[in-house]
Amino acid sequence: MRQCQLLMSVIREHAQREPETIACSFQPRGPETAIHLTYQELVDRVESRAKLLVRLSYRQKYIALLFPTGLEFIVDFLACLRAGVIAVPLNVTRNTKQFERTLTILADAKVQAILTTADTQKTLSKQLSEVNGYHESDFIWIDEHYRTLEDIDIPVVSPEQVAFIQYTSSTSSPKGVMVTQANVLHNMQVMQTSCQHPKGAVVGGWLPQFHDMGLVGHMLLPLYLAGRYVFMPPMSFIQRPSRWLKLISQYRIFCSAAPNFGYEHCVNLIRESEDLSDLDLSCWKIALNGSEPVSAATMQQFSHRFYHLGFDHNAFFPSYGMAETTLFVSGGPQGTGVQSLSLDKASFELGKVEVKPDGVKVVCCGAINKDFTVRVVNPQTFEICRSNETGEIWIAGESVAQGYLNQTAKTVTDFQAKLANGDTTPYMRTGDMGFILDGQLYITGRIKELLIVRGRNLYPYDIERTCRSYRYAAKGNGAAVFTFTRDSKTKLAAVVEVSRQALSEKPPRQLIDDLKALVTEEHEIALDRILVVPPGTIPKTTSGKVKRTACSALL
């Protein structure tokens, strides 16, 4: 473990030792458009911006970062860390609903100013003018041209000071997680030991820079390792997913992460006819899969599709973590690939773990890092569960954040939970259900998403996965399963996105009957209501998670 207490101290050390080593490479549109920053260039720019922030008296104030994907975000985020300014990274979006979410966060964090580019400020100003009660003058804007020539001393920053506010991509109201400088450095150390990244590792991909996996796992980690952060805009990947694979091959990326959706998107949208013969994915040693339920079937399909390009199935690295733990909790070891257990379905629905061939498949989220204490707890009694029981995952460790911004009561409830056995350790309640077997973590679902129907405990994404496997289902994460009440009884419903061709050619009743039969056969339970809709209808969060509660309004 490093003795340095701040990430920026580590990065400045790299610049002193290897000033000409490339720290960041951004590819906006293709190889010919790549832009690079060496460690010395990066540190020089960070120092300049940090002095500006100190000069403007923003130490320990909340500053929003609203940038398109690019090098400017890296510089200004690190400048905030260096100057002791509390960064609030946010999404730049043209979507009205998502922009309303951004405004909600700006108000919640009481931001003092907005760091952005001049071009982005123009776009945001126009969006603000279209929202009642807001005007450009409501905020102080600091673009990339704002400079100070004064030689200002940058005060020392405490490791316990909040470094940034990571707003969750929750399907409910977003919560601002207060991540400290010490949390950041500790999670870097955790990831290095669990993932076994070599010094100088190349890490990157398409993940958004404002999202915890893209920010901590893709951007900060390689800079901690004296490595190289390589990245492209998320929309480039969405439009043509093969660009991700080309980026990995071109820059010999060692670790690239994505939620399960990313791998599914490659399988569904990269055409067999597309010429990828010059790609070599043998460099990709860690294909991290996290942030949403992990599908063994998706990873198998991805491996089968791209093994001829040198992709190794054992490179898959299912993992577990969240913004509340800075990012990473479990995963690996490297090279073990996808591990899963087959459990008896009836026992599983009663919260029992009983291994049985041809049962319910649960993917392993890897080994729990030794720096965490993880317990499986009964969420009602706060007692530790038996080894053959599922329960809520509780976590303690130095990566666990301070709590939620402006939510004292919820911080006490979620970050200072105590076990019934008298253990005084404060645990963070994840809200996730699961179990531990041989030091490996298995996640079975979210407490708040557990559906209790006709005496059975069901997780919505198991049924959603079945709906998405329907031959006429639209490509992507297009299914939502939830309950509703009718005549004082709990009913089970599904909204499923179906291809436009199927909607125009097939009677709706046939599609509904097909889906009902598929779910009944797979899960032995009948859907009481099914709605088939065109692609893009189901509401989702900024990270692609289905908003099930909002879907109920579609019925």
Image (cartoon, rainbow, N blue to C red):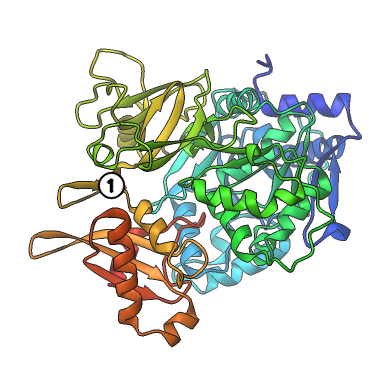
Q: Residue furthest front?
A: 357
* Residue 494 image position (x, y, % from top left): 31, 65
In the image, is residue 53 above or below residue 268?
Answer: above
Q: Depth check: give the residue in front, 426 or 213.
A: 213
In the image, is residue 227 above or below residue 498?
Answer: above
The image quarter containing residue 266 is bottom right
Q: Residue at x 32, y 32 (%)?
A: 392
Q: Depth check: give the residue in front, 491 or 372.
A: 491
- Residue 300 vs residue 152: left or right? left
* Residue 54 image position (x, y, % from top left): 68, 37
Q: Depth check: give the residue in front, 70 or 535.
A: 535
* Residue 171 image position (x, y, % from top left): 39, 54
Q: Residue at x 72, y 34 (%)?
A: 222
Query: Which residue is tagged 1?
Result: 450
The image quarter containing residue 355 is top left
Q: Residue at x 36, y 39 (%)?
A: 407
- Residue 71 vs residue 134: left or right? right
Q: Residue at x 39, y 58 (%)?
A: 466
Q: Quadrant of the N terminus?
A: top right
Q: Quadrant of the C terminus?
A: bottom left
Q: Residue furthest left?
A: 487
Q: Amino acid at mark 1?
A: Leu
The crowd level at tag 1 (other Cα within 10 Å; few <14, some 14-19, many 20+) is: some
Exactly how many numbered labels are in the figure? 1
Q: Residue furthest right?
A: 20
Residue 555 visible, this orientation: yes
- Residue 61 vs residue 546: left or right? right
Residue 207 visible, this orientation: no
What SS does tag 1 mark?
A: loop
- Residue 509 vs residue 28: left or right? left
* Residue 525 image position (x, y, % from top left): 23, 57
